[in-house]
Image: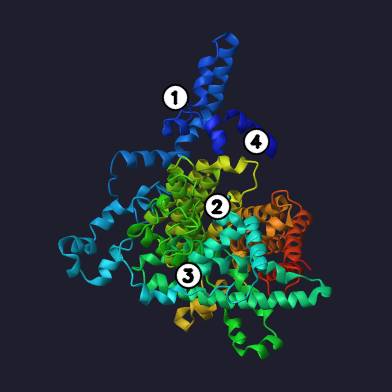
Amino acid sequence: RNRKAGQATRTLKACELCRKQKTRCFRSPENKACLRCTFLSKSCSFEVTLESLPLTPSNSSSINTLLSDQAETNRKLDLIYSGLREVLHHIKGPEKSDSNSNSHSHSHPHLHSTPGLINNDDAPSSKMSPFSIVNNQLKPVDVPRPILNLLNLSTITGNRGRNSYFESTDDLLTLGILSESETVDLMNDFRRNYGRWVSFPSNLSTSVLIDRIRHKSSLLLTTCCCISLRYSLNSNNSNDKENLQRMKKSYRDLVKQLIRDLDRSLIKFGAFQGASDLGGDIEFLQAMVILSIYSFSISSIVPSTINEASLIEDESDLNLRDFNLDPWFLSSIGLTTFITKSTFGTLFKSNKKGIPSKSTVGKKSFPFTILYDELDSDEYQTLTTLRIYNHMCLVHLIQCVFSGRMCVLDEIRINYCTATLSLPSATNFDGRMVSEIGILLIAYNYMQILSMTDSGSLSECESNFLSVKEEIGQWYEQWEYLFSQPALQFVELNYNFCNLIIHYGYTYQKMSIMKPLNKENSPDNGGDLLATAPMYEERNISYILENSDRNSLSKMFHHSYNVVKFVNDIESDSYFAYLSDQLHFCFYFSGICLVNILRYVIDNGQLNVLGGSEVSEIVKDIRNLIDKFSRVGQDNQDDIITKYKIGLENHLSEYLS
């Protein structure tokens, strides 16, 4: 794919406003202006350009050619901007209730824009709730305090004397875990390599940013420093052992502080929600985003920091070996907190009244949130807050797919992620995020259907599979333009990963229905399907491949290979190192599947499944992925990156020896 040519083409077709916003620009089939400018009621440079052109034969021909070229694009515009138009519909009038909106629908696979997250103060579900009815019918003194506190998170004044537990000044600086210069260095590293997941004001110096975070959330500061320090423990320089041991001690102490901060924060948001003067809502949510995305990384290297010397110094360090963050659980907490605070709290209230000054910084009356730049508009601040929600939706959904657990949100709340697309400041980044959530939702719903129909009929299995393929086709038609963009992104990777999971799940279920038990293992002879069928035993993927049809086998090969090959587009090892834990696992899992498929087609003479790809080239790409893991992990045996490298390397050697 010629990325530069693609960039040049889009630049020529974009109007001035869309070019400034760095977002995709599409012509309107009804107007001279593009769709974005039409929706925002802005003057579009296309209008000026077309009106200024004299209609000479040559110019007229050019315009007709241009309009003709847009014919195919126009067909896709309705799909791409369906969410945007639906937002406009919601703004003009209330949406009719859909009794089936909370259930999985094959006919509506896409995420639908819902402005309810921003305007939850007026949400019917909130106003019509029994809690609200009781609150409206009685005097405040007669309303049970737990209900009153919940409904008035933004107005309840907490007793400061009773909240001293949360006013602790013990953070990583006051406790001497890190020096000021070390903290600044780690925060600089965080802003440079992980800043895309949170939006710290770019105009603030790192030292000022640290001061603001300290007054809002020790948890956020500790989290940022933890994730920034992790790769410092992977040094394979034998001449720097003293510094490495010092780094390990710092990381060990940071993890202890992280546990204390997390404990304090969970109690605060779980048991003292009415104490609004405590603040720090956004900072807590930011910390949940980072911890959810990098849980595996933070947890995996803790054992490498514990040795005999550290245990002599502090026996309690032994307990750290059990430290293990669960990204599904953390993202669940983040999402439910976000929903609660956006419904009853002040997440989307204007922050303009809280601009800090020297006299207010550090005081409890200081409401300013460090997430925001005081020069930003309210609309952009809303967009920034919504991005936190989208990041948590993304990591939660993919963890649901990874682990097979249920999603804590219904589809109505997941649909809230499209609210970013209704804002003028939304960019291509927001579209990519929504598209990734969309394909993950399709995969998640399909896997949930399979879990509920284990004993279903073969016709039901085929019907479900045809429906999910239709959904994927509609998703692809809506977001196909993202695949041809020159910037490195991961929509295509998620698309291939989800397809791999779906085809594997389909084959798995079909085999559970079709494959009969051996007579000696039949229920009549005391046999147990779950205990004896090979598909439920160790290394069942080989059994699945043996019983898959050629089309499914071919699809699983191509999708797993596409994920593995994607690593070749990531030239920088540093960029690869700072990718999310979820993407690293997608690479690893796809590599494991690809090795199994390759071994199967070689042993069974089905090389035609490879579609012309050479075995040697496939093995080379797998080794490229292994080498990438190796360079990043630097032989730290406890780092999850090294575990991926060793596991994939051993699997390749065993299967293709």
Between 92 and 121, the one lying in front of the other is: 121
What amino acid type is highlighted by mark number 3?
Answer: Phe
Give the residue at the far top of this rendering. Answer: 56
Mark 3 or 4, nearer chain start:
4
Q: Secondary structure at mark 1?
A: loop
* Spot occupied by residue 3 in the image (x, y as percentages of width and height): 68, 39
Residue 7 disc label: 4
Distance from label 2 to label 1 (Cα)?
38 Å
Q: Residue at x 57, y 42 (%)?
A: 482
Between 484 and 449, the one lying in front of the other is: 484
- Quadrant of the snapshot with the C terminus: bottom right
Q: Quadrant of residue 310?
A: bottom right
Q: Which residue is mark 3?
A: 329
* Spot occupied by residue 349 in the image (x, y as percentages of width and height): 38, 52
Q: Is residue 86 visible?
A: yes
The answer to whether 330 appears left or right of 128 in the picture is right
How many neighbours does mark 3 have within 10 angstroms: few (below 14), some (14-19), or many (20 or more)?
some
The answer to whether residue 105 is above or below residue 238 is: above
What amino acid type is highlighted by mark number 2?
Answer: Pro
Distance from label 1 to label 3 (Cα)?
48 Å
* Spot occupied by residue 279 in the image (x, y as percentages of width and height): 42, 64
Give the color scheme: rainbow, by chain, secondary structure or one colour. rainbow
The answer to whether residue 412 is above or below residue 178 is: above
Distance from label 2 to label 3 (Cα)?
29 Å
Residue 201 disc label: 2
What amino acid type is highlighted by mark number 1?
Answer: Asn
Q: Secondary structure at mark 4?
A: helix
Q: Give the foreground label among 2 and 3.
A: 2
Q: Which residue is mark 1?
A: 31
- Quadrant of the snapshot with the N terminus: top right
Q: Give the foreground label among 4 and 2.
A: 2
